[in-house]
Amino acid sequence: MIDKTDILARGLAECSIPQERIDSLAQKMESYISEIVLFNSAYNLTNTSEHDALVTRHILDSLAAYKEIREYADCFGPSCVIADIGSGGGLPGIPLAAAFLDDSGVRFELIERMEKRCAFLENCAAILGLGNVVVRKTDAQKIPAKSYDLVTFRAFRPLDENMARVLLGIVRDGGILCAYKARPENIRAEMSAIKNLVPEYEVVPLAVPGLEDSQRNLVVIKKQ
């Protein structure tokens, strides 16, 4: 019988997680999955509570962009601040923060407006020992302008003009907005609708272990 942690560990390696961090990160992600399963029915955190689906569709999907986000964060130096907007159950913020845990200085802020989900996120950060995480109960619209070097966004909704304006507003000049998206044709339609606001962007294909038949991409918008 194949150990579930071994499956997760192999996926983490495919996501470019440094080899020396894989065992520790896999253990943290298994603990995180246990918390999701425990509280999902009450808090509506994810669309599944099945272990393997959580591993592939949520944990590894979040970490498939680790290499790119790691490179972007390096550009801002050790004081880099990354925000996960509409964090919900902590995706991609919790897996990314856990992967960055040994990088002193890089901080994550998980932005979530629902109090019970904020309580869940704070509990997870404590259980996983994520000293690089702060949970903020607020709406993105209420965050001061130019607060973050890098902003992630994985909510399953279109990046419309209002949302793009809000998210880019909280990104510092020279900062980056990274939106997790799926099909290229949908991305083109979304970005075409906001081309006056975002004339240039990059689409980075993501390879998610276990989801080889799915199209996953990172839309990268650099704020001038």
Image: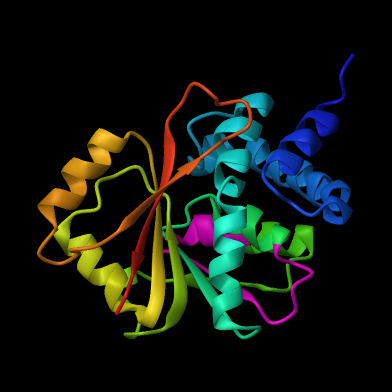
Q: Is residue 102 magenta?
A: yes
Give the side of residue 50 with respect to residue 158, left or right: right
Across and down, in percent, residue 45 comes to: 51, 43
Q: Can you say whether 211 is above or below 10 in the image? A: above
What residue is shown at x 44% (from left), y 37% (from top)? 216
Across and down, in percent, residue 5 comes to: 83, 33
What residue is shown at x 54% (from left), y 28% (from top)? 48
What residue is shown at x 58% (from left), y 45% (from top)? 64
Q: Can you say whether 23 is above or below 76 in the image? A: above
Across and down, in percent, residue 72 comes to: 53, 69
What residue is shown at x 48% (from left), y 40% (from top)? 44
Q: In which image quadrant can residue 146 be found?
A: bottom left
Q: Is residue 13 visible?
A: yes
Q: In which image quadrant can residue 96 be found?
A: bottom right
Q: Which residues are magenta?
A: 100-121
Q: Nearer the viewer, residue 92 or 69?
A: 69
Residue sticking out furthest to the top = 1
Give the side of residue 201 with respect to residue 112, left or right: left
Q: Can you say whether 56 is above or below 134 in the image? A: above
Q: Is residue 50 visible?
A: no
Give the side of residue 118 with respect to residue 175, left or right: right
